[in-house]
């Protein structure tokens, strides 16, 4: 699991995927989410604007990322 540090109260899911370098463009994040390949705290997430807070765990492409 990779720890991804944020300096704000929360970060939106699509921005987080870019920040964590899972994707390089926002459109790539959009397609990953639309294709039902992203899970937040073990639940399928289809909202690009889902707010992530510290301790949330994002799973995508077999990798896990923890918001810290």
Image: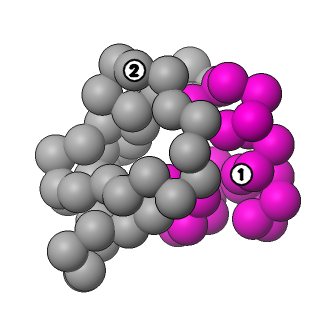
The kind of secondary structure element at disc 1 is: helix
Front residue of 39/50: it is 50
Q: Main secondary structure of the magenta part?
A: helix
Residue 27 located within the stretch drawn in magenta: yes
The kind of secondary structure element at disc 2 is: strand
On-image quarter of the C terminus:
bottom left
The residue at which mark 1 appears reads as 29
The residue at which mark 2 appears reads as 43
Residue 3, position in %: x, y?
Answer: 29, 50
The answer to whether residue 61 is left or right of residue 6 is right
Label placed on residue 45: none
Above or below for 41 versus 32: above
Front residue of 55/10: it is 10
Q: Please say whether residue 63 is visible from this viewpoint.
A: no
Q: Which residues are magenta?
A: 13-38
Front residue of 44/66: it is 44
The residue at 45%/63% (across/down) is: 12
The answer to whether residue 35 is left or right of residue 39 is right
């Amino acid at each position: 699991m990779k720890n991804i540090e944020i300096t704000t109260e929360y970060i939106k899911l699509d921005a987080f995927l870019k920040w964590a370098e899972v994707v390089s463009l926002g459109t790539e994040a959009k397609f990953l989410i639309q294709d039902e390949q992203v899970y937040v705290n073990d639940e399928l997430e289809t909202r690009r604007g889902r707010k992530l807070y510290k301790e949330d765990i994002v799973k995508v492409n077999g990798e896990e990322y923890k918001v810290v």
